[in-house]
Amino acid sequence: MEGGIPRAAAEELDAADPLAAFRERFVIADPELIYLDGNSLGRMPTATPDQLRAVLEEGWGEGLVRSWEGWIDWGSRLGDRLAEHVLGARPGEVVVSDSTSVNLYKLAGAALEATPGRGTVLMDAEDFPTNRYVLQGLAAQRGLRLHQVPSDLDGGIDLRQLRSALDRDVALVVLSLVSYRSGALLDMARVNELARSVGTRVLWDLSHAAGAVPVELAATGADLAVGCTYKYLNGGPGSPAYLYVRRELQARLRQPIWGWFGQREQFRMGPTYDPVPGVERFLVSTPPLLSLAAIDPGLTLVEQAGVERIRAKGLLLGQLVSELAAAWLTPLGFRSASPSAAERRGSHVSLYHPDAWRICQTLAADAKVICDYRTPDRLRIGPSPLYTRFTEIWDAMDRLREVADRRTYLSRPAGLARVT
Ligand SMILES: *Cc1c(COP(=O)(O)O)cnc(C)c1O
């Protein structure tokens, strides 16, 4: 230890951690491996295999088609639990279905359909690519202008810049509450208010926020939101996403994919599409039951821990990352690529280094530390509070400084892999 924080300080934080016991509720296949990528794919809860086995053996194997009686409204039931414990929404405002990209298309399409006469869609130019592509497609189909508001790669979108882009031609604003690259956290209440002042709506992407930071959709008067369940909610690879539509708005919006799961009296198989008035009108089709079932164990853990406590620990984890980075890594060519105050970030921290990609690969291959790389030159460190120890942060940062110091990464290929 020369400079920075002694490992004993991290040990003390672990000893005082009220969420420490939650780690045992996750599969830790290799205790040596430090996993700092829970914001990309959360770890598997220990209860998930049994949950899936029950659905397979009793539900599918024995129950066969009869099981749909119990399964049919799982998307709504999971939605209500997310609403209450994770999203700060009211019952009947959230439903689980499809993927984040598809839900974004559905809700953006619905909002644009309901806003004739306005010609602009606003988004953060540095938002997650799928959001950009979905909105480019919608804008092209509907003859709208997509205004990508420039935003700082490290600090996120500047509210003054957003305000100056907002006018009465804006039909919809799409923003991520937590930026996928820098972790920058927006003020949801403030942004909703700005949008309302010009009579428009915000569609929030909560993918990097849900289960990491408190979200108050109802209290901030949010209109629309989407997000995924496989990051901090630990629902498993490709688990279905959720969507939120403010209750007062639901019956007025009609989504572009008219599927039978949105239909009134679905099993009457009526001749013409006539959607239910509630949030289920934003459903399309038969849910992927196994993936839907896998959401339950992860959500149960978040409910038991409570988002407030998760956030409190996330702030401390993030602070430890940034303090150690400042002490150990700045002299080695790194700098912070996230807002400096922990309260202005979600649960991940990004670091800039010109060789971030090769360092990321070397950490995984030689030092048993998994974090991820994001273009153009960012190392993203995402400690998920439910299962990450403070000593793991200390050890990971120590291994990172060793890799950077010895420059062992220079022998790795510079070309990107298929998945980064
Ligand atoms: C992870 C993420 C997604 C994922 O979209 P999929 O449709 O599940 O592939 C979308 N938006 C943001 C902001 C994300 O971080």
Image (cartoon, rainbow, N blue to C red):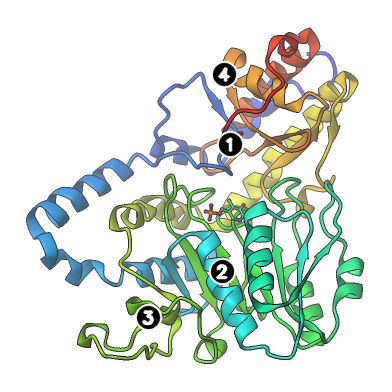
Kindly check if marks 3 and 1 are in contact, taking CB atoms under 8 A apart as contact.
no
In front: mark 3 or mark 1? 3
In terms of image quadrants, where is residue 196? bottom right
The numbered dot on residue 160 is none
In front: mark 4 or mark 3? 3
Residue 201 visible? The answer is: yes
Instruction: Name the secondary structure under disc 2.
Output: helix
Inter-mark Cα distance, 4 to 2: 38 Å
Inter-mark Cα distance, 2 to 3: 16 Å
Instruction: Report which residue position mark 2 lands on.
Output: 105
What amino acid is labelled 1 in the image? Asp
Asked if 349 appears above or below 414 in the picture, the reply is: below
Q: Is residue 204 left or right of residue 275?
A: right
What amino acid is labelled 4 in the image? Lys
Q: Is residue 310 left or right of residue 184?
A: left
Label 1 or label 2, whichever comes before in sequence order: 1
Instruction: Report which residue position mark 3 lands on.
Output: 262
Q: Which residue is found at the position 55% from the left and 60% from the top?
A: 101
Label 4 or label 2, whichever comes before in sequence order: 2
Q: Residues within 10 Å of mark 4 (few under 14, many from 20)?
A: some
Q: Tell me residue 18's x, y (percent).
A: 54, 43
Instruction: Report which residue position mark 4 lands on.
Output: 368
Kindly check if marks 4 and 3 are in contact, taking CB atoms under 8 A apart as contact.
no
What amino acid is labelled 3 in the image? Gly
Inter-mark Cα distance, 4 to 3: 46 Å
Instruction: Name the secondary structure under disc 4.
Output: loop
Instruction: Name the secondary structure under disc 1.
Output: loop
Residue 397 visible? The answer is: no
Inter-mark Cα distance, 1 to 4: 12 Å
388 and 285: which is toward the camera: 285
